[in-house]
Image: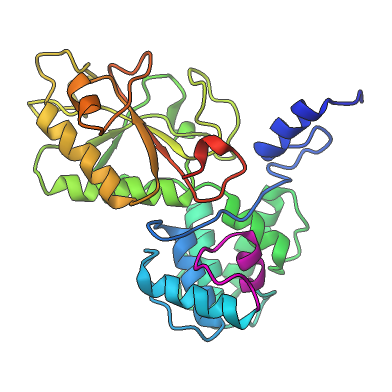
Amino acid sequence: MRRLGPAVLAVLLLIGLTPSTAQAYANAFFPTQSTGNRGADVLAIQYLLQHHGQSAPADGVFGASTVAAAKAFQTAKGLGSDGIVGPQTWGALVPTISSGAAGAAVRALQVELNAKRRLSLPVDGVFSTAVRDAVIAFQSHAGIGADGIVGPVTWRNLAWHYDYPDFAANLCDQDPDGNGTAANWATSAAAAQLEQAARSFAGTSQGKVPYGDAGFEHGGDIPGHGSHEVGLDIDIWPIRTDSAQCTAGRITWQSATYDRAATRQLVQAIRAAAPGHVRLVFFNDPVLINEGLTTQWEAHDNHLHVRFCEVVHPNSLYTC
């Protein structure tokens, strides 16, 4: 095969592919999680901290107590004590486990398998036959050694793998670009943060939040979008005055049925659900732009493009 230039290779590495492998995501990385993040990866981190004797909650929210536990763990391991769980801290957290193991590390594994493979394993801390079967199935899916043993490579691929949103969280599925349900995947943090915003918005009694395209299960190019390749971009629709945004069709900010006040509440809920982890929200309502809630971008009159971010990410567009 002909040699690839550095720029092309860099892009391939960024999206988790190499030109010489059939693996789904051969260059997966541990996603950096920190204060304000939430979701399955945060919950797994909390269980892993417990495995190492740290006092961490198990609520899936990276709050002050999780920061304190992460700092204590980092200090114990001689790492930089900043409370941010990046690849180095992840690498120190994850143990090698297999059939017969029990405890908090197995709970972390069960949480990741349930989220990333849409399973319903009991989170009981028991590495059962069902867990081993799920591990082997995931390893085969990821194109890595399918031996049922969960070591650093399996942990890294599990943590990197995208998550599927919970539509019971006041969301409705919309596919305006023809990509179908296959385009609903996002990182665990992005999915959970939007779910939390939708739950919060439910309290306003103004209908569900329409969920458009996010990304494919393993990232990469998605038709109709110039981004949405790394699991941190999610499209949603503006809110209507009749609260029928899930059934009556998409509108623009200029439409007579556009509800600016409700859409403002939704954007505020999104930002509140992921403090420090919303890079921007593209939407062309000039009032919301003037209020600093959204950002103008071509072709964003009829939907809001939420871009989440992490404190460290291989692509600078997604760095907070």
Query: Is residue 203 visible to the viewer in this orientation of the structure?
Result: yes
The residue that appears at 43% across and 70% down in the rendered structure is 67
Residue 153: x and y in percent read 72, 60
Q: Which portion, as a residue range, is magenta?
A: 78-94
The structure's colour scheme is: rainbow
Figure check: 295 above or below 95: above
Residue 316: x and y in percent read 56, 38
Residue 257: x and y in percent read 10, 18
The residue that appears at 47% across and 72% down in the rendered structure is 46
Quarter of the figure with residue 128: bottom right
Q: Considering depth in this image, is 99 or 115 the residue closer to the camera?
A: 115
Q: Is residue 83 left or right of residue 88?
A: left
Figure check: 4 above or below 87: above
Q: Is residue 235 left or right of residue 311?
A: left
Q: What count of labels does the image hold? A: 0
Whether the magenta-drawn stretch holds residue 170 is answered as no
Quarter of the figure with residue 254: top left
The residue that appears at 77% across and 38% down in the rendered structure is 22
Quadrant occupied by the N terminus: top right
